[in-house]
Image (cartoon, helix red, strand yellow):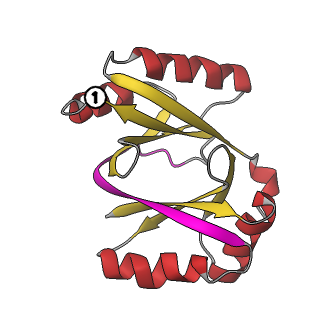
Amino acid sequence: MRAWVMVSAKESALDVGKLIRDSLNFDAIEVLGPYDVVVRANVKNLQDLWENYISLINSLPLVGSCTTFLSIFEKTKPIDKIPSAFILIDAAQSEHIEIQEELFKIKEVQKVDIVLGPYDIIVEVVVNSIQDLFQAVRKIIRTSKNILRTVTMVAFPSSNRS
């Protein structure tokens, strides 16, 4: 099962992302948005998530808090490039599977997970420019009238990820 750990930093997101990568060897991606760092975790169960991810991340000195989203339906394209942005989607009830299927058809979309938490769907987008990102977000929003709102978190360029 995939889990998304959204980390809020006490201080600089770049410092927290680097700390998580260096101390815990997790794939931590710094983002601009309501959270500062995104960590994807592939776990066996909730205990594994708690013991091997959340408690370790929370123990780091610069971490303010973690919000965790559990993926209940995952779709991933074979390309596994570093994401350019994460889009959190609030959708109308009972339309999640249909929205996921339509979103997955969009070229720029790499992953689409239906999750448990304050948002319903998390989408990873890979683009080459900010203009391409704007176009991808527009495509996502237009995918369904049942997408109620979105929050886009732009990932820092990979050169910051050491």
Q: Position of residue 57 (x, y in %)?
A: 59, 76
Task: Name the quadrant containing residue 148.
Answer: top left
Task: Name the quadrant containing residue 66.
Answer: bottom right
Please, is residue 53 above or below residue 17 in the view?
Answer: below
In screen coordinates, is 32 left or right of 80? Answer: right
Total count of labels: 1
In screen coordinates, is 66 left or right of 45? Answer: right
Callout 1 crowding tier (Cα within 10 Å): few <14, some 14–19, many ≥20? some
The residue under the point 74% across, 66% down is 10
* Residue found at the far left of this picture: 94
Please, is residue 84 above or below residue 95 in the view?
Answer: below
The residue under the point 63% across, 77% down is 25
The residue under the point 74% across, 51% down is 158
Per the picture, the main secondary structure of the magenta-coloured stretch is strand
In screen coordinates, is 107 left or right of 59? Answer: left
Residue 75 belongs to magenta span: yes
Q: Position of residue 56 (x, y in %)?
A: 56, 82
> Which element is circle 1 on?
loop
In screen coordinates, is 41 left or right of 145? Answer: right
Foreground pick, 107 / 134: 134
Q: Position of residue 90 (x, y in %)?
A: 39, 34
The residue under the point 37% across, 81% down is 48
Residue of label 1: 92
Foreground pick, 71 / 79: 71
Q: Which image quarter holds the C terminus?
A: bottom right
Q: Position of residue 86 (x, y in %)?
A: 55, 41
Q: Which image quarter holds the N terminus?
A: bottom left
What are the residue bounds of the magenta stretch? Answer: 63-80
Residue type beneath disc 1 = Ala
Please, is residue 38 above or below residue 20 in the view?
Answer: above
